Image (cartoon, coloured by chain):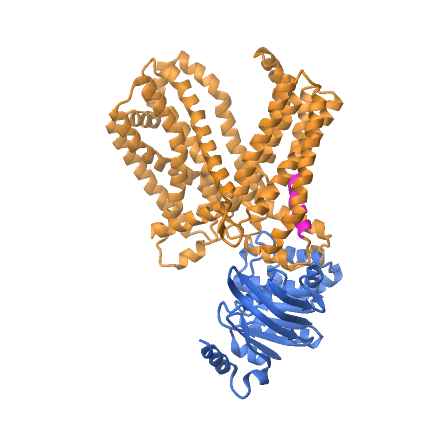
Chain colours: A orange, B blue
């Protein structure tokens, strides 16, 4: 039964990625190849990033033969990265699956339904875990030599530690779900959750250098303290480095934790009473009825969807939060950043700062472009827009307006703060703002084009549309390339050509791209919409 | 009010609707029956401009669906068999949304919302999120939203599924009232008793083809609609 349920989930993901529109035909070869390359690129990037981290730790810990601490730290990073990366979609998968009621009517044990969802969490966790621990072992074997003992430890510990990751992911998902149930406003919930995660991330990131310095100075003392106080890290480290008693102990503890988590989740799902919906039971008053224009009512519909859908808000609202965090960080830290960059000899970054700001804006925006999943999110309600006397162009425009609300306004805050912090002259600041605006419009329009071209209306879980669809993955790639291009041109040409001329040319090119994308949306896009 | 001439709709090579011709006049409650997959929903969706069709012509109030779908949509309302309504809106927000699209004045929408919400006993739930509604409540909301702009033609796909007996009775009364006032209703159903009592005319579709259509007397004669339907189903099996 578990196999059957998991097959169903796999086919939903497969459909979201590889099938085209409503008719269920396969996506084009180009799409599939690009998607594969994108996955490969992301995977290899992750591997390389963690090879760097492994080198950093090995430098300090190998000479003093503290292998347990090396593996312990890498495993801790793996658990942190994997669990937080997958927590939001796990919350939706566990608690907001549209097929939940249907599955519960079938002769399937609740624990089996739960397990089928947890298996998906395990698989994703394994991929993340592998991309952290494989480089860790690679670096270890490169310096300390290969041993069968560590290979066996790796083969046992990778799946077992993934079970622990699954447990941690489910606990975070449970906390996210409980917050979303208790706090009525989805926006407040999303802000609390995102801020919490970003806060933890930056706390660790900013403390990393200081922590490493302290580790180098007092390595044995810290090692002893960790052994006694953070015993679990010691245990994981020992297990990963091939101590079989530690492997057994770790496996036993993980199994016990998994069993407890499973029973808690099972209980919470059994007693789930649609707590999120508060019944007001109030009569309609005349003042509740408001008249709006078609454009306004369509935009309000989009906005309501955005602020009332947890997966949508968390994934696509992340950009807005990141823009504001970046703006605040810049306002506070710009004074330290300028001398630091000059000291590092990175004057070219300072010269190309306006372009660097635009590139960062593009990168942040592409992390959660609202236009990319917007059409797919209509799901089975698409009949409403299709049967109403609404021009598809107006539908697309309303979705683009949401982008202005979620991305462009926060991006302009960042641009304003950057132009003040880096003391740019008015003309440069203005050209930078126009360039950023036009580049973000390219992202918005490209997201819309991808969203129309690869629309998926038959999902059971909004996360599939928001996080796992082709448009969302492709727009991240496009954003990354566009940011690289913008930043790269800045670094190459800064000091050689007036930056304002470069920005002017880039603005014109972006506007040309916007024109072409808009033309596609208003012709082919409308045609696809009518045929859905 | 509705003229369907030689409508053909294919899914790949399969003809879901095959050269269907049907005319509905103002004041008629027209029933549409057929087995599952016969082509009822496809026909209704083609009229509602949801599905494009391959051949033929559909005219609503003399306006072609192919040439001027926007004008057609202004004159019709469609109620699907499974009312997947925006779960992130309250019932009232949804009705306001529909009213805005059809440019219904504040006074008119206030009056209609109050009237129909009371008739369908939904008034105390209109400020709740649609996500908290039962299937029947969503169906009632879909019905109210279809009535809010006084459409000339209402297309209903299995409208009684999920409705409680009182709401079903209310809906039948409203359907008759709309047609008495010059509107027209084209609805699909599997409940043959309802079709027999409610419809002025009936059409039977089988494997995409219209096998019989006309007034109730023309279609069933002295027999019951159920026996005629089962006979026709058996004939070409």
Residue A197 locus on image (x, y percent): 50, 33
Front residue of this view, candidates A261 and A17: A17
Extent of the magenta region: A392-405
**Is residue A333 depicted above or below A169 in this figure?**
above
Asked if the stretch drawn in magenta spans residue A403, the answer is yes
Q: How many marks?
A: 0
Asked if the stretch drawn in magenta spans residue A107, the answer is no
Front residue of this view, candidates A230 and A9: A9
Residue A17 locus on image (x, y percent): 48, 45
Residue A92 locus on image (x, y percent): 48, 45
The C terminus of chain A appears in which quarter of the rendering? Answer: bottom right
Which of the 4 image quarters holds residue B78? bottom right
Outermost residue toward the bottom?
Answer: B222
Front residue of this view, candidates B85 and B126: B85
Q: Residue at x 61, y 20 (%)?
A: A333
Q: Residue at x 64, y 62 (%)?
A: B145
Magenta stretch, overall SS? helix
Q: Is residue A271 visible?
A: yes
Q: Is residue B199 visible?
A: no
Residue B137 locus on image (x, y percent): 56, 63
Which of the 4 image quarters holds residue A155? top left
Q: Residue at x 36, y 28 (%)?
A: A134
**Is residue A385 depicted above or below B178 in this figure?**
above
């Amino acid at each position: 039964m578990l196999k059957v349920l998991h097959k169903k989930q796999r086919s939903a993901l497969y459909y979201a990625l590889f099938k085209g529109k409503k008719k269920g035909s396969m996506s084009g070869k180009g799409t599939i190849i690009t998607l594969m390359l994108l996955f490969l690129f992301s995977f290899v990037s992750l591997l390389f990033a963690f090879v760097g981290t492994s080198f950093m730790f090995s430098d300090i810990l190998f000479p003093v033969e503290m292998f347990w601490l090396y593996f312990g730290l890498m495993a801790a990073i793996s658990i942190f990265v994997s669990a937080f990366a997958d927590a939001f979609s796990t919350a939706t998968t566990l608690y907001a699956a549209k097929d939940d009621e249907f599955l519960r009517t079938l002769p399937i044990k609740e624990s089996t339904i739960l397990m089928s969802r947890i298996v998906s969490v395990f698989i994703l966790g394994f991929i993340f875990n592998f991309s952290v621990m494989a480089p860790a072992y690679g670096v270890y074997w490169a310096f300390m030599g290969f041993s069968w003992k560590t290979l066996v430890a790796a083969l046992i510990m990778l799946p077992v530690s993934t079970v622990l990751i699954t447990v941690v992911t489910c606990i975070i998902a449970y906390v996210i779900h409980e917050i979303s149930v208790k706090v009525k406003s989805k926006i407040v919930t999303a802000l609390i959750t995102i801020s919490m995660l970003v806060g933890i991330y930056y706390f660790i990131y900013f403390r990393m250098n200081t922590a490493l310095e302290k580790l180098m100075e007092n390595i044995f003392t810290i090692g002893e303290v960790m052994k006694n106080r953070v015993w679990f890290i010691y245990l994981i480290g020992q297990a990963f480095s091939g101590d079989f008693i530690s492997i057994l102990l770790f496996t036993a503890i993980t199994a016990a934790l998994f069993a407890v988590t499973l029973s808690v989740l099972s209980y919470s799902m059994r007693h789930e009473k649609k707590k999120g919906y508060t019944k007001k039971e109030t009569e309609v008053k005349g003042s509740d009825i408001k008249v709006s224009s078609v454009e306004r009512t369509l935009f309000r519909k989009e906005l309501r969807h955005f602020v009332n859908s947890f997966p949508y808000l968390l994934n696509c609202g992340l950009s807005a939060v990141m823009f504001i965090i970046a703006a605040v960080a810049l306002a506070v830290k710009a004074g330290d950043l300028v001398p630091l960059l000059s000291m590092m000899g990175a004057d070219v970054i300072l010269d190309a700062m306006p372009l660097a700001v635009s590139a960062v804006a593009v990168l942040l925006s592409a992390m959660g472009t609202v236009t990319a999943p917007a059409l797919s999110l209509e799901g089975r309600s698409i009949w409403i827009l299709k049967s109403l006397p609404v021009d598809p162009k107006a539908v697309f425009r309303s979705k683009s307006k949401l982008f202005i609300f979620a991305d462009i306004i926060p991006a302009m805050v960042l641009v304003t703060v950057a132009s003040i912090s880096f003391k740019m002259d008015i003309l440069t600041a203005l050209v930078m703002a126009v360039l950023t605006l036009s580049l973000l419009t390219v992202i918005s329009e490209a997201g819309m084009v991808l969203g129309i071209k690869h629309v998926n209306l038959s999902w059971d879980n909004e996360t599939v549309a928001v996080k796992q669809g082709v448009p969302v993955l492709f727009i991240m790639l496009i954003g990354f390339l566009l940011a690289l291009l913008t930043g790269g041109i800045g670094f190459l040409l800064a000091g050689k050509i007036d930056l304002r001329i470069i920005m002017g040319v880039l603005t014109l090119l972006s506007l040309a791209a916007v024109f072409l994308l808009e033309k596609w949306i208003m012709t082919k896009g409308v045609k696809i919409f009518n045929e859905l | 009010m509705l003229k369907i001439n030689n409508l053909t709709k294919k899914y790949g090579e399969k003809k879901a609707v095959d050269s269907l011709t049907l005319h509905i006049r103002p004041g008629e409650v027209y029933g549409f029956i057929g087995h599952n997959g016969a082509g009822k929903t496809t026909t209704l969706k083609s009229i509602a401009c949801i599905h494009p069709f391959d051949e033929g012509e559909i005219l609503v109030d003399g306006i072609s669906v192919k040439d001027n779908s926007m004008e057609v949509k202004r004159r019709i309302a469609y109620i699907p068999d499974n009312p997947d309504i925006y779960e992130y809106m309250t019932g009232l927000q949804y009705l306001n949304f529909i009213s805005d699209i059809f440019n219904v004045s504040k006074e008119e929408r206030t009056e209609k919302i109050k009237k129909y919400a009371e008739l369908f006993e939904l008034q105390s739930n209109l400020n709740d999120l649609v996500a908290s509604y039962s299937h029947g409540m969503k169906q009632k909301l879909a019905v109210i939203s279809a009535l809010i702009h006084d459409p000339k033609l209402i297309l209903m796909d299995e409208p009684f599924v999920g409705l409680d007996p009182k709401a079903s009775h209310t809906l039948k009364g409203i359907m008759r009232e709309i047609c008495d006032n010059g509107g027209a209703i084209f609805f699909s159903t599997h409940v043959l008793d309802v079709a027999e009592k409610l419809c002025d005319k009936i059409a039977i579709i089988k494997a995409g083809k219209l096998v019989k259509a006309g007034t109730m007397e023309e279609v069933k004669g002295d027999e019951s609609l159920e026996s005629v339907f089962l006979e026709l189903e058996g004939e070409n099996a």
